[in-house]
């Protein structure tokens, strides 16, 4: 029976077209992911080469004042891009993977990003997560909306009912065959992704696979439940397409607006204004109060006196530091609200399978908002390490030629977040049992009414 059902299903022209469409879209998504990873690697390599070239150029042009050299010199921190990000690009195409900062005020540099074509940002990337979340359900709907109802409408269901010893088992076989074919294609694409994107076979990858499989099963559960309602094929199709629109477009858009309204971020502008004001107004103020506040922040530098000159690098970098400190409150609130947005999105995702799947795939690929926030925190620590290293050299006018500039190489931030298997897999698993169980009960109740 299994072989006959499979042959009957796979010989359909519509099925071949649907599977061919998914396969083509999946292969395109893998190529998009490969191009993205290649571009990231190329950018990282260029940053490594450019940092040493720039430092040597600054040494050549500013050989006498290390304070002036460090006014211009930039040091890079790279956010490591895992191969899995090629399957779920997330926010990596918007947020910078490289932070190049000077030791001047950080808040004016932290949120710098590359310019992007707004049309491209609107369309987004056709990565694998897009194919999985948006296109796989459409093909599943096309495969299952008439799996039972068409038999009834064509007048062949009574023959099946008479010949089958286990009618409920036969219905289950219809859906299992369809699910098996779609899951087989899904696993084929993920297997190809391992080779195309050089993805390591580690725990995040297998969780990625498990999340993808459960998402497909959620949609088969929805299709199974709709088929159990004893409706016409056209009605089933309308209901399933409506469910697709609601779960993938309407509800996510509504949740996004809710999150934006609950956690607005006017602090983004306030942080920039406060930082600039905190720095620029110091030019018109006496030097002593600014430097005294700097000493309070860094008491280890009190033994460096204020030079009796109109301008000194001690005073200048103290002004830069005060700009960051005076915007620290707004900067902290901005980071807190972004973190709250991330947390509430994950909680709301527990009741919306598409949202949960997208967020979890991004987290596993380290391409979501959470990764970017942690990268910005690491940027703050990286900037502080640079300041503490160079401040004594600036204040003592350390000879530029005595500094080993070759040792200042590009640093890489490698995130190793804890993996919560239950948090990732439990919500879709509950939806599979919910819709599958409801469909099973409906079929048992209405079995002989079909």
Image (cartoon, grey):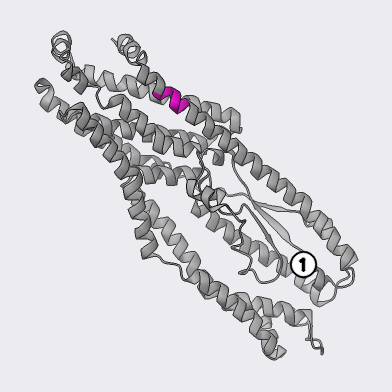
Tell me residue 374's x, y (percent): 55, 57
The residue to which callout 1 is attached is 72
Which one is in front, 87 or 202? 87
Q: In the rendered view of the protein, which quadrant contains the C terminus? A: top left
Q: Is residue 402 visible?
A: no
Q: Is residue 431 above or below residue 250?
A: above
Circle 1 crowding by C-alpha within 10 Å: few under 14, some 14–19, many from 20: some
Q: Which residues are magenta?
A: 18-23
The reply to whether residue 381 is in sight is yes
* Secondary structure under the numbered disc 1 in the rendered image: helix
Task: Answer above or below: position of 17 versus 130.
Answer: above
The N terminus sits in image quarter:
top left
Could you say which is closer to the camera, residue 435 or residue 386? 435
> How far from the left and from the top, in percent, is residue 367?
53, 47
Compared across the picture, whether 104 is left or right of 122 comes to right
On the image, the x and y values in percent for residue 379 come to 62, 61
Main SS, magenta region, reads helix
Queried whether the magenta region covers residue 271, the answer comes back as no
């Amino acid at each position: 029976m299994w072989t006959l059902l499979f042959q009957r299903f796979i010989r359909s022209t519509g099925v071949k077209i649907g599977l061919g469409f998914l396969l083509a879209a999946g292969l395109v998504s893998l190529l998009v992911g490969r191009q993205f990873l290649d571009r990231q690697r190329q950018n990282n390599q260029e940053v490594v080469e450019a940092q040493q070239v720039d430092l040597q150029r600054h040494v050549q042009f500013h050989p006498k004042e290390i304070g002036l050299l460090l006014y211009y010199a930039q040091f890079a921190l790279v956010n490591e891009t895992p191969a899995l990000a090629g399957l779920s690009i997330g926010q990596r195409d918007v947020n910078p993977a490289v932070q190049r900062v000077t030791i001047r005020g950080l808040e004016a540099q932290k949120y710098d990003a590359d310019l992007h074509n707004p049309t491209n940002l609107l369309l987004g990337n056709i990565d694998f997560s897009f194919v999985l979340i948006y296109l796989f359900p459409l093909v599943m709907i096309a495969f299952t909306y008439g799996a039972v109802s068409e038999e009834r409408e064509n007048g062949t269901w009574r023959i099946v009912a008479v010949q089958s010893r286990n009618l409920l088992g036969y219905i289950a076989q219809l859906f299992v065959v369809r699910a098996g074919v779609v899951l087989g294609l899904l696993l084929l694409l993920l297997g190809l992704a391992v080779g195309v994107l050089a993805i390591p076979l580690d725990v995040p990858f297998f969780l990625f696979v498990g999340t993808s499989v459960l998402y497909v099963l959620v949609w088969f559960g929805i299709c199974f439940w709709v088929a159990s309602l004893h409706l016409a094929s056209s009605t089933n199709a309308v209901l399933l397409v409506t469910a697709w629109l609601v779960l993938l477009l309407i509800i996510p858009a509504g949740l996004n607006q809710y999150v934006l309204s609950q956690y607005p971020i006017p602090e983004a502008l306030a942080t920039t204004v406060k930082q600039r004001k905190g720095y620029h107004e110091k030019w018109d103020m006496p030097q002593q109060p600014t430097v005294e506040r700097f000493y309070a922040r860094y008491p280890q530098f009190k033994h460096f006196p204020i030079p009796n000159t109109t301008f000194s690098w001690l005073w200048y970098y103290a002004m830069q530091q005060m700009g960051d400190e005076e915007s620290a409150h707004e900067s902290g609130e901005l980071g807190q609200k972004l973190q709250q947005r991330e947390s509430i999105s994950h909680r709301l995702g527990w009741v919306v399978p598409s949202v949960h799947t997208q967020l979890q795939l991004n987290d596993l690929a380290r391409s979501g908002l959470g990764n970017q926030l942690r990268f910005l925190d690491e940027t703050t620590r990286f900037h502080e390490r640079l300041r503490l290293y160079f401040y004594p050299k600036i204040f003592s006018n350390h000879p530029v030629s005595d500094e080993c500039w070759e040792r200042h190489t590009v640093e890489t931030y490698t995130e190793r977040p804890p993996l919560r298997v239950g948090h990732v897999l439990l919500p879709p698993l509950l939806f599979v049992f919910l819709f599958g169980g409801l469909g099973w009960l409906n079929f048992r109740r209405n079995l002989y009414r079909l």
